[in-house]
Image (spheres, helix red, strand yellow):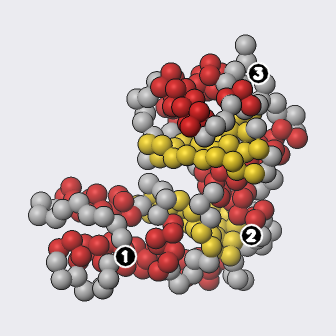
Amino acid sequence: MLLVIDIGNTNTSLGVFDGEKLVAHWRLTTARSRTVDEWGVHARNLFSLAGLDVTSIDAIAIASVVPPLNFTLRRMAELYFHLTPLFIDHTVDTGVAILYEPASDVGADRIVDAVAAIKKYGAPCIVVDFGTATTFDAINSQGEYLGGVITPGITISSDALFERAAKLPRVEIKNPQKVIGSATVEAMQSGLYHGYIGLVDGILRKMIHELGGSPKIIATGGLAPLIAKGSEFIETVDEELTLEGMRLVYERSSNRNFVGARSS
């Protein structure tokens, strides 16, 4: 079985694939101070709760946008799974040409999102990933990664209101019952929700025009289901897109002689 680990700035997602089937997945807080042993214990506990045998993992793939954690996760894989992990980045042959300059600036999560979107939904397409930042990634009809847009995530916007405005509270991000808020919390929720949908749809409208054709619009990430409900353009929410992309990249790499070898 394959263990995939997507390390984001705010959350880390883990998934276990048995062939093409995702048999278990979890989301953790990305704690940069967590030690090798803490990561290992967390992983083993999750496996135990899911009724999975740690020794059944014969390969690990990691996509990270937090470079300081790379060494820690590599050592965790070696010590607790006795495997050398594949770290996915722009140097790995994914089958998708990256036209972004420099290619090294493209986050691993954006690369695997593109791979999975092309495989599952076809090209051209646009992937909107609602993470710490919200990223919009454009893939043309030839299946080439063109680039996209990076904006502050909706949670960052909410936190900024709380931190920079003395009288404004921290609020839950949700779709309020009406646009015109009759209290401060409702007014903030309306601004965050409807304002962010306006941002998303405004960007998508221009990207669709620039890309041409009728691209599929796919959303992923923690808040994708909430925002997609109000969007004019988002057609599909795929919360497992990133994990699926990692599986596809690993399989391509293993077929090209990458072996997630057992470490000593």
Above or below, comparing residue 120 to residue 11 in the picture: below
Tell me where residue 152 appears, x and y as whole percent: 41, 61
Who is closer to the viewer here, 103 or 264? 264
Mark 1 to mark 2: distance in Å? 28 Å
- Left or right of residue 153, residue 15 in this image: right
Tell me where residue 22 appears, x and y as whole percent: 70, 50
Q: Is residue 226 visible?
A: yes
Q: Nearer the viewer, mark 1 or mark 2?
A: 1
Q: Is residue 149 visible?
A: no
Residue at (76%, 38%) from the top-left corner?
Answer: 1
Of the 4 image quadrants, the one containing the C terminus is top right
Q: Toward which corner of the image does residue 90 lie, by quadrant?
A: top right
| First in residue order: circle 3 vs circle 2 | 2
Per the image, the residue denoted by label 3 is: 262
Q: Toward which corner of the image does residue 145 lie, by quadrant?
A: bottom right
Amino acid under disc 1: Asn
- Left or right of residue 177, residue 101 in this image: right
Q: Which mark is residue 175?
A: 1
Mark 3 to mark 2: distance in Å? 35 Å
| First in residue order: circle 1 vs circle 2 | 2
Q: Are marks 3 and 2 in contact (CB under 8 Å)?
A: no
Amino acid under disc 2: Tyr
Per the image, the residue denoted by label 2 is: 121
Who is closer to the viewer here, 3 or 7? 3
